[in-house]
Image (cartoon, rainbow, N blue to C red):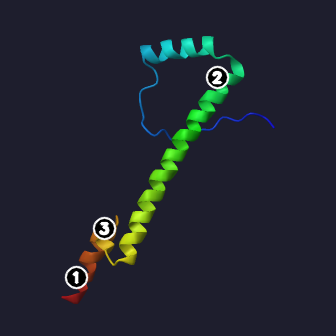
Amino acid sequence: MPSESVHARPYLHLPTHTPVAGALRAVESFLLRGGQQTARRNAWASVVADRQRAKDRREAEHEMAALVTGGAAATVGGAAAGAREDAVRD
């Protein structure tokens, strides 16, 4: 099975073209040859993807809990929906 790179949305976006990043990349390429370097990058991409999925899951659970308890205003579109309901009642 061919090795594939995992491209995930970064958890925290930092500039990647800094002098320090270049120096670290050079040291990394010297110390970690070929497969080790790729494996390390793929492992970090997996960590970043897992963090993003956990964040998305927490947000979805919060929104579902708000809907179940009737607190639709706690959701992203809830405030506008609540205002429309008030306008209809008047």
| Label number found at residue 74 | 3
Which residue is label 2 attached to?
37
* Eye-nearest disc, 2 or 1: 2
Q: Position of residue 77 (x, y in %)?
A: 34, 67
Helix, strand or loop at disc 1? helix
Give the vertical position of 50 relative to 4 (above or below): below
Give the vertical position of 75 relative to 35 (above or below): below
Identify the image quadrant of the N terminus: top right
Which residue is label 1 attached to?
86
- Amino acid type indicated by mark 3: Ala
Q: Position of residue 36 (x, y in %)?
A: 67, 23
Q: Position of residue 57 (x, y in %)?
A: 48, 58
Quick one: label 2 or label 1, which is nearer the N terminus?
Answer: 2
Query: Circle 3: is it few (<14), some (14-19), or many (20+) Cα within 10 Å?
Result: some
Real-space Cα distance between discs 2 and 3?
Answer: 44 Å
- Is label 2 in contact with label 1 (beta carbons under 8 Å)? no
- Is label 1 in contact with label 3 (beta carbons under 8 Å)? no
- Amino acid type indicated by mark 1: Asp
Q: Quadrant of residue 71?
A: bottom left
Real-space Cα distance between discs 2 and 1?
Answer: 58 Å
Helix, strand or loop at disc 3? helix
